Amino acid sequence: MSEARRKPATARGQRTRGRLLEAAEDVFGERGFERAAIADITRAANVAQGTFYVYFESKKEIFTELVEALGATLRERLADAVAGLPDEANKERAAFSAFLAYIAEHQHLYRIVRQAEFVDEGLYRDYYRRLANDYIEHLEPQRRAGRLAHIDPEALAYAMMGIFDYLGMRWALWEGRMPPEAALDDVFAFINRGLERPLH
């Protein structure tokens, strides 16, 4: 697809394209990639079916862009949540809160990302690699300052992502609420003890 086609020049075109992506999020989340049809997406976006092809060439292309957009926005939310916070303990908790808030806004996130493994495995892996790389980059200043335990940064990134992922599924996705404060206190006590640099 050409760059001009990918990025509409007019505000109206940008809004229409945005509506198609929002509709695709609901349709893929509710029906799944295989069962979803382009007609379902255009119907949900309230646009003519031919309009779809002004902005996207195929169902797979809009799915790919949707996964990339969800991942990019999530990474931005996490970065904004921790910006300016003084210590790692506060940052981890703020990042997790931001993650839960994002799930609350995008209830289909889990299902869409899991579908990506079967639609395009490279897309699926890239979603998690980018999250991990951002986390590693976020930890580097703390590591260089000697304030964190000596842990392989990639292993740590994926371990933390796993904790957040399953806690988010347990409470934000299944129950639509934040985890109990006592549960969060226990989780972050466990995390912070693991991240602390030993005294000797």
Image: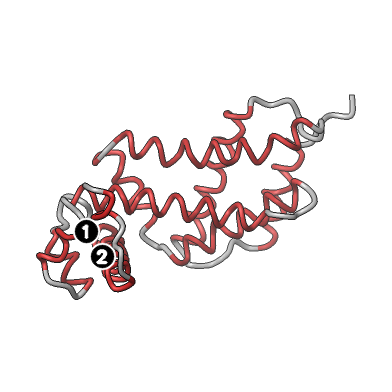
Q: Secondary structure at mark 2?
A: helix
Q: Is residue 71 left or right of residue 16?
A: right
In the displayed structure, 98 sits above or below 87; it is below
* Distance in Å between CA atoms under marks 1 and 2: 9 Å
Q: Residue 197 is drawn in which quadrant?
A: top right
Q: Is residue 53 left or right of residue 13?
A: left
Residue 34 appears left or right of 19: left
* Residue at 16% from the left image edge and 71% from the top image edge: 43
- Which of marks 2 and 1 precedes in the sequence? 2
Residue visible at 21% across and 51% down in the picture: 33
Q: Which residue is mark 2?
A: 20
Which residue appears at 27% of the width and 68% of the height? Answer: 13
How busy is the neighbourhood of tag 2: few (under 14 within 10 Å), some, or many (20 plus)? many
Residue 192, above or below 8: above
Report which quarter residue 142 is drawn in.
top right
Instruction: Say which amino acid is labelled 2.
Output: Leu
User: Which residue does the numbered mark 1 point to in the structure image?
Assistant: 55
Q: Regarding mark 1 in the picture, which secondary structure is present there? A: helix
Q: Nearer the viewer, residue 106 or 2?
A: 2
Instruction: Identify which residue, 55 or 106, lies in the foreground.
Output: 55
| Three-letter code, disc 1 | Tyr
Does residue 173 sit above or below 118 in this rendering? below
Of the numbered discs in the image, which one, if any, rests on residue 42?
A: none
Give the percent coordinates (x, y) of residue 154. 58, 29
